[in-house]
Amino acid sequence: MQSLNNSNLLSLAIWLPIVFGVLVLAFGRDSRPGFTRVLTLVGSLVSLAVTIPLITGFDNAHHGMQFAESHEWIAAFNIVYKLGIDGLSLWFVPLTAFITVIVVISAWQVIETRIAQYMGSFLLLSGLMIGVFCAMDGLLFYFFFEATLIPMFIIIGVFGGPNRVYAAFKFFLYTFMGSLLTLIAIIYLYNRSGGSFDILTWQALPLTMNEQVLIFIAFLMAFAVKVPMWPVHTWLPDAHVEAPTGGSVVLAAIMLKLGGYGFLRFSLPIAPDASHYLAGFMITLSLVAVIYIGLVALVQKDMKKLVAYSSIAHMGFVTLGFFLFNTISVEGGLVQMISHGFISGAMFLAIGVLYDRVHSREIAAYGGVVNRMPKFAAFVVLFSMANCGLPATSGFVGEFMVIMGAVKANFWLGLLAATALILGAAYSLWMVKRVIFGKIANHHVAELSDINGREFFMFVVLAIGVMVMGLYPAPFTDTMQVSVADLLQHVSISKLPQ
Amino acid sequence: MTNLAGAAATNLGPVHAEVFLLVAASAILLIDMFSKDDKRMLTYVLSLLTLVGCAIFTWADYSAGTTAYTFYNMYVSDPMGNLLKLFTYLAVGVSLVYSRQYTGQRGMTSGNLGGEYYVLSLFALLGQMIMISGNNMLSLYLGLELMSLATYALVALRRDHAMSTEAAMKYFILGALSSGFLLYGISMIYGATGSLDLVQIFSVVNSHTANPNILVFGVVFIVAGLAFKLGVVPFHMWVPDVYQGSPTAVTLLLGGAPKLAAFAMTLRILVEGLLPLAFDWQMMLMVLAVLSLAIGNLTAIAQTNIKRMLAYSTIAQMGFVLLGLLSGIVATPTGGSAEGAAAAYSSAMYYSITYVLTTLGSFGLIMMLSRSGFEAEELADFKGMAKRSPWFAVVMTVLMFSLAGVPPMMGFMAKWSVLQAVTHSHQLWLAVLAVLFSLIGAFYYLRVVKTMWFDEAVDATPISTPLDMQLVLSINGIAVVAMGMMPGWLLNACTNAMSKTLGS
């Protein structure tokens, strides 16, 4: 269906940022900051540009993988460099490239030492994460999935806050633990399928209930940590608080989605019977995340921690949607993931803007910011409204679809899920009230200057994303429809050997 | 076999490389006597040229892909041996490049010591080649002793240095003890089978005519002796002390190439000779492997001396090699396939080669940070390396992530291929245990990365390194990434060599 000349677009989307990242690391110097920054910006823009044809060339009605590529990689073990995207993964590729551009812009004046290491790490990270979304070979997926840990570890550890070493280690070891068990599941599937790493082959492989449950749990170890689901979420608040702004943005906007995406690509289709069998368990964990973590967010004193907990609650919505197994809820979960990419990214950027000026993330250190930063306040109010799911913003679409799906499945489930809207409104708006509105709290706030052109630009772009997705979500849902329907049909058929 | 042995009795073809090395090493010893240069440049260059010469001979045999026996079947040149020898030359050569400045600054190549560092390294290499190629218990043992004697002397090279002398003493006594174990085991096997030839031992054991009690007794002692040489728990006590106490240049020579030789010797004795007793030795290796993974990884966490930490890491890594070795044949009544066996042994071989390449770089970097009168042995000496020398901090980071088994480094593919072999032999619990211990292992490798990148430098002395060392270190680092991303050819080479060797 695709013409030959754009058949290696996915490879370009993966390797361009990596190549630019290596170039930035090799030639970027603190002694020539301008060159380093411009090189990074060019790299991120070029990388974004190559993902545009993916959206325009995507065929909504097509079943299966598009822009597929396949090359022999390690012949001895039948490992194939196999890429492809469908409706489940399409939007994450441009989203990743887009967020990277935003991160580069956000760091423009803020990072003044070891610029090349900061910028280069984000470019590498961008390519590796796109690789995760595109990989259609199990080992290739794992390759990218694990490799993302290295740049993130460096970003948190080098550029983070006072407790950064602890946070970086916690981040690395938590995720490493989960993925090592996944590695065993991947090897097991390889042996079981007679020597294939092809994810589509695995999806068609009949497995006994016992095997399915074990494989499901092994994958759950990796993806639950990444999402993160309660109770393995504790690394996220630490990582967010300590990470530099860009690190938090990428972590919340993209990295958490690797876990959610993993559920759709591996857990559900490879172990459908186990997914149904354990759906109650997964839904319970998701609801705990939505309600309990929502309450935890309410009492946070640190803005970054608050948004971090709100991320966990929102991702709880995503996993809830996936395990209800109806079209609208799964699509809702996907929409929620993309929307959360914009909103959480924007929220962390906003906190970064304040932190750059006052060097505090404590809510109590602020008050009356609107008096000094009116433009900034307008954006913060918009993004906070989106965070609590106000209609006409992207936050609403996903949550509404998931709640609809939940009500369809069970009224009480829907009711519990809907409490998230109330909690979300409570913690988001209460924070806005304390930070943005009121009287000017202290002389730090009194000395604040409003956002400059660079900051204005990145907020505007994100705001457009949030509004467009909220007002006209059809382009997003249309691309997902066929793939989600295929997935659900696949999941509804038992794989147990007869 | 008998007519082949008769024909091969006087054939020197398979030992060209060994003969060349022996002649060249002796010649270098003589030439060095007349050298007045304290830095021994001539000896250094001649040693490297010797290695190149050996590599040419071995490469010719390797690319022919044949198996040839000589000296009445006591010696064999086969693809597996030749591949391992090529990497052994590489390891020794790289070690010599890394240690040139280090040994020069510490007076290890001047005064009445002369160029013996180089000559002893070459004799140790000769011993390793015999360990790799021996096809008879006696020739294997002689190779082991030749290597050991040369390395005892190397560890003791700095006679006036208390730590070195102590390390040499420990190494010598425990080494002699383990040789005794091995010899005792060999004599048991000889008593039961009436032969020292691996092929004949195999056929006698396979025919079930030998006394099984004496055989198992012999296997226990042989495994203990080999475990000493590989440095796996509970026969690991010498490893941390010797690694820490030896001059780093010698640690590199001990921690690199000899591991390949010890692996080859283990494979020759256990697989080529005693395969019918696999059920027994696999159980022993399993215990050794699990203990090594546990104690190696847990103890490494507590270390502040980076050489000692890497010593414990070696113990854990050797546990992984054993995991590959013990997955060759499924320990069930039905047995396993020959194909699966070759895959498992080649995964262990690939792991050993990966480990050696990574270790070379890590110790090379420790030597790079050292300078005259200062040993960069503490973890804290790596503080702020990212600022002092960003490129070499990247190289060290790559090596540490490789040891931890994170993609895209070579170490990931090695871990993966061993885990694949373990899972293939239906020992899922062993694979789970192995990854859990690698998780613990990741902590101390990460700590090195943390020290280099997150901590501020305490020592701002510029790092001065000779160009050849910089170049080789850079290639070493790049190779670990490149061979992690493109592991196909080496995996293939290992699998082909192993199946050819086991098939013949």
Image (cartoon, helix red, strand yellow):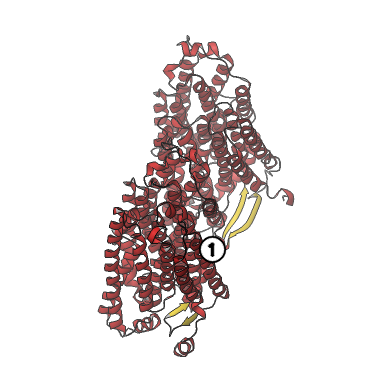
Residue B203, compared with residue B431, is above or below; it is below
Residue drawn at x 34%, y 53% as measured from the top left? B244
Q: Chain of mark 1?
A: B
Residue A72 in the figure: left or right of residue B48: right
Residue B417, compared with residue B436, is above or below; it is below
Q: Residue A301 location in percent, x, y?
A: 40, 22
Q: Quadrant of the N terminus of chain B?
A: bottom left
- In this rendered view, identify the residue nearer to me: B477 or A134: B477
Q: Amino acid at mark 1?
A: Leu
Residue B97, compared with residue A29, is above or below; it is below
Residue A368 seen in render: yes
Quarter of the image where one finds residue B142 = bottom left
- In this rendered view, identify the residue nearer to me: A94 or B57: B57
Kindly identify which residue carries mark 1: B490
Q: Residue A236 location in percent, x, y?
A: 43, 35
For label 1, the crowd category at 10 Å Cα-Cα, with few meaning under 14, some 14 to 19 and many 20 or more, is: some
Q: Residue B485 location in percent, x, y?
A: 55, 54
Residue A207 seen in render: no
Q: Residue A104 location in percent, x, y?
A: 59, 32
